[in-house]
Amino acid sequence: MNSTTEHVDISVIILSWNTKILLLRCLDSIINSKLKRNIEVIVVDNSSTDGSVHAVREKYPEVILIRNDANLGFAKGNNIGITRSRGRYVCFINSDVEVLDSCFDLLYDYMEQNRSVGIVGPKILWPDYTLQDSCREFPSLWNNFCAAIKLNKLFPKSDFFSGEHMMFFAHDRICRVDSLVGAFLLVRKKAIDQVGGFDERFFIYAEEIDLCRRFWMAGWEVVFYPGAEIVHFGRGSSSREPIRFTLEQQKSILQYWKKYHKIPGQVAILIIMAMNHLLRIGAGVLLLLIRSSKKNNGLNNIKKHFVCLLSLFWPQKVCQSTTQ
């Protein structure tokens, strides 16, 4: 950590919403790690009600804490953090992440040696230290179709049948990729000043895909760097309201297609998404008949896909019913 008079190498921005325990663990991993670089840590709280703000103030008074009056979403929350940042690099970290030793220094050094790179991401591990795929291809009708009918699961080593998730890639080498998972991104501040921050039309999900796409369009490379590692626990906030967050994810996907594709593409992705939900509902009903012991989970899954299917055609009505 640094004083306000020192230069800052990396501004770490952590967006949090009701993830107090995970947030404190994330801060522990950052502040107690061995760092060669000067960093500042900015926590942007999206109006949590679980005592997150008080806990951060009490345990880590040196952290810059911004408390929003409402849940402003991932994009806008992080953009607020950017306005307070002073570093040559900005690092966006989910609150459900544990940063492993040397991660910041390794990524910083890589960026310093590769001036054409605008965004770099580390290898991401599950809590049991198994690999969590984090490299993505830009969404297309074909890779969405493959994911909808599970071709990506049937042929996990095939790049042709892959969905957006590059499960065929071993994540064992430095690689230029279309986009990276937004759990941990180290971004060149100079590039942010040129390209802009997150598009605030994305409340949550797909905003990192959009950011990476805009960086590529502006001539900045996006790179996966496996030498640095983090642990990502996953679904820190979204697990509280699975249907709501699945709807938000679907809304963001449609927003992405509206932004980058013409009407025929938008209609086609709508059909593929509807097909995906219908297949999942059908499979869920069959599983209920076969495995009645998992009835509650099965019913919840069917309900989630049914609500999402309805929202494709009656979004306002579904939105009203889920927020009441």
Image (tube, rainbow, N blue to C red):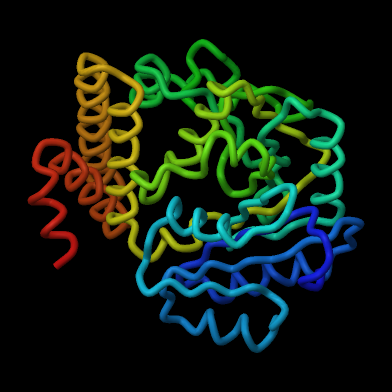
Of residues 131 and 121, the one nearer the viewer is 121
Judge by depth and name the residue closer to the eye, 199 or 5: 5
* Image quadrant containing the C terminus: bottom left
Q: Is residue 218 above or below residue 133?
A: above
- Residue at horizontal 62 percent and vertical 85 percent from the top: 57
- Give the residue drawn at x 64%, y 48%: 184
Residue 293, image x and y in percent? 32, 57
Residue nearest the observer in this picture, 46 or 288 = 46
Percent x, y for residue 265? 26, 17
Q: Quadrant of the N terminus?
A: bottom right
Q: With 250 as the anchor, is 65 left or right in this view?
A: right
Residue 227, x across and y down, in percent = 83, 38
Is 281 positioned to the left or the right of 169 in the image?
A: left
Question: Residue placed farthest to the top in the image?
Answer: 160
* For residue 125, side relative to residue 293 (left or right): right
Farthest front residue?
5
Identify the residue at image location x=34%, y=35%: 253
In the picture shown, does residue 226 fall above or below 230?
A: above
Count the marks: 0
Occupied quadrant, residue 3: bottom right
Name the residue rendered at 56%, 14% in the picture. Answer: 159
When the figure is inspected, residue 302 is found, relative to residue 218, above or below; the finding is below
- In terms of depth relative to the viewer, which is nearer, 317 or 129? 317
| Image location of residue 157, percent across then percent down | 60, 18
